[in-house]
Amino acid sequence: MLTVPEVAAKLGRDPETVRRWIRSGRLRARKVGTQHVVDEDDLRSLFKGDVLPLPPAWKKTSTGETMPNVVHSVRRSRAGR
């Protein structure tokens, strides 16, 4: 069983994002005291094929170049690199 902060750290997401997934029903969790806990099998099932592929038009810029990985760039800048 994983707590919300542990799930967030494992996925590289914000804990509030994980809480939103729980509230919306996208991620199953149980409440133990005041904390939500997530079974690792439920966490694995979250990402089994339910992520939609990017539309082909989103893979290239309007000039035909490959789309830059903006998320990677933001994470690197936040890490001070």
Image (cartoon, helix red, strand yellow):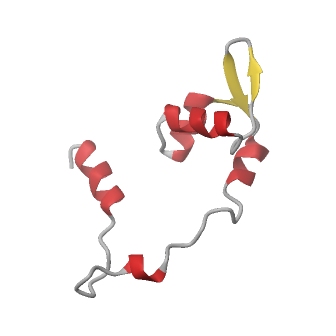
Number of residue marks: 0
Based on the displayed image, in which of its 4 quarters is residue 42 positioned?
top right
Q: Is residue 10 above or below residue 35?
A: below
Residue in view at x 51 percent, y 32 percent: 15
Is 24 in front, or is 50?
24
Foreground of the two, 25 or 11: 25
Q: Is residue 7 left or right of residue 2?
A: left
Residue 37: which quarter of the image? top right
Q: Is residue 45 left or right of residue 4?
A: right
Left or right of 27, for residue 69? left
Horizontal side of residue 45 vs 69, given as left or right: right
Q: Residue furthest top?
A: 33
Q: Where does the image place residue 32, in percent across and percent down from the top left? A: 75, 17
Q: Is residue 73 above or below residue 22?
A: below
Going 66% across and 57% down the picture, which residue do you hit?
Answer: 47
Q: Name the residue rendered at 34%, 81% in the picture.
A: 60
Q: Is residue 11 above or below residue 48?
A: above
Q: Quadrant of the N terminus?
A: top right
Q: Quadrant of residue 72?
A: bottom left
Residue 40 at x, y = what percent?
74, 42
Residue 50 vs residue 41, the one in the foreground: 50
